[in-house]
Image (spheres, grey):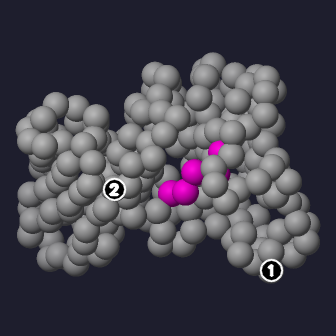
C-alpha cells in the first residue's frame, strides 16, 4: 500500500494556541482520511477528503487536501484540553484497506 | 455507523499461553479487520477476517501465530498464540461498512500484557 508520512510526531501547545499536523505521500492519493485517538481510547473517524484542493471545516478543525493530492493537513484553531490525543492520517492502501500514518500526539497545557 | 464490542478489554497473560479476543458488531459487515497498536505507535494491520474463508494476513503475520475465525458477518475472533512479552500490545478490530478504503469503525481494543 501507499506510505503516508506524518509530522510532527509530538506537539506541545498552550491552551488557546493553534496546532497543525501534516501528512505527505510520494504518490498521488485517491483520498485521505483523518482519525483522532484520545488517550486510552480507540481511533475515531473525523473526515475523508477526496477532491484536489478540498478544504473542509468541523468547528475549530480545518482539513485540507493538496492540489496535487499528495499532502494533507489538519489545523486546529485555539486548542482546548479536549483536543488532546493522537491524530492519524490514513491513505488508501492495497486491498482497499487504509494505511495509517505514524500519528501526531497533541499535548495541550492549560 | 457501527457499534463494536471486544472481549476481554484487557488481560495479563503468562508467556507461552494463548489468548482469544472476540469482536462483535451490531450489524452485518463484509469487511472486518484486526490491528495491533504497540504503545505510542501507529496501527499495524494484522489481517482481514473473511467470512467463510481463511483470513488474509499482512506481511510479517502468520496464521499459526494469529489464527482468526469469522463464522458469520457480525463476529470474529483473533487468537494470539504462544505469547511472548513482545506480543504485549493493544489489539483492535475494525469494520468498513462501505466496501473498502472508507471510514473505519474501531472497537474499544484489548490491552494485552504478557509477562
Residue B14 highlighted magenta (yes or no): no
User: In which quadrant of the rendered image does the C terminus of chain B lie?
Assistant: bottom right
Read off the residue under disc 1.
B115
**For this view, does B27 lie left or right of residue A16?**
right
Task: Locate residue A85, reporting x and y percent.
Answer: 35, 63
Residue A24 sits in quarter: bottom left
Report the magenta residues as a range. B43-47
Q: Kindly indicate whether the residues beneath marks 2 and 1 are on one polypeptide chain.
A: no
**For this view, does A55 lie left or right of residue A10?**
left
Dot 2: within a 10 Å radius of its alpha carbon, few (fewer than 14), some, or many (20 or more) residues?
many
Q: Residue at x 71, y 65 (%)?
A: B112
Q: Residue at x 78, y 34 (%)?
A: B54
Does residue B44 appear anywhere in the picture?
A: yes
Determine contact: label 2, label 1, CB under 8 Å. Answer: no
Q: Residue at x 59, y 29 (%)?
A: B31
Disc nearest the viewer among 2 and 1: 2
Does residue B109 appear anywhere in the picture?
A: no
User: In which quadrant of the rendered image does the N terminus of chain B lie?
Assistant: top left
Q: Is residue A50 above or below residue B39?
A: above
**In the depicted view, which residue is nearer to us: B6 or B68?**
B68
Q: Residue at x 69, y 71 (%)?
A: B88
Task: Locate residue A59, reporting x and y percent.
Answer: 13, 43
**In the depicted view, which residue is nearer to us: A65 or A67?**
A67
Residue B46 highlighted magenta (yes or no): yes
**In the depicted view, which residue is nearer to us: A69 or B78?**
A69
Count the labels in the image: 2
Name the element at disc 2: loop
Q: Is residue A31 above or below residue B58?
A: above
Read off the residue under disc 2.
A4
Main SS category, magenta section: strand
Amino acid at each position: 500500500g501507499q506510505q503516508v508520512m506524518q509530522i510532527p510526531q509530538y506537539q506541545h501547545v498552550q491552551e488557546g494556541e493553534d496546532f497543525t499536523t501534516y501528512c505527505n505521500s510520494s504518490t498521488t492519493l485517491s483520498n485521505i482520511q483523518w482519525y483522532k485517538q484520545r488517550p486510552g481510547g480507540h481511533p475515531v473517524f473525523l473526515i475523508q477528503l477526496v477532491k484536489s484542493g478540498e478544504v473542509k471545516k468541523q468547528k475549530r478543525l480545518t482539513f485540507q487536501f493538496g492540489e496535487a493530492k499528495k499532502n494533507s493537513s489538519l489545523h486546529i484553531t485555539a486548542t482546548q484540553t479536549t483536543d488532546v490525543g493522537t491524530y492519524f492520517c490514513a491513505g488508501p492502501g492495497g486491498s482497499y484497506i487504509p494505511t495509517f500514518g505514524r500519528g501526531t500526539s497533541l499535548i495541550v497545557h492549560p | 455507523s457501527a457499534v463494536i464490542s471486544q472481549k476481554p478489554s484487557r488481560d495479563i497473560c503468562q508467556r507461552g499461553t494463548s489468548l482469544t479476543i472476540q469482536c462483535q458488531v451490531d450489524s452485518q459487515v463484509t469487511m472486518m479487520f484486526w490491528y495491533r497498536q504497540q504503545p505510542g505507535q501507529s496501527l499495524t494491520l494484522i489481517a482481514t477476517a473473511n467470512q467463510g474463508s481463511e483470513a488474509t494476513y499482512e506481511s510479517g503475520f502468520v496464521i499459526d501465530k494469529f489464527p482468526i475465525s469469522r463464522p458469520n458477518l457480525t463476529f470474529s475472533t483473533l487468537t494470539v498464540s504462544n505469547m511472548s512479552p513482545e506480543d504485549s500490545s493493544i489489539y483492535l478490530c475494525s469494520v468498513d461498512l462501505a466496501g473498502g478504503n472508507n471510514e473505519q469503525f474501531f472497537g474499544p481494543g484489548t490491552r494485552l500484557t504478557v509477562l
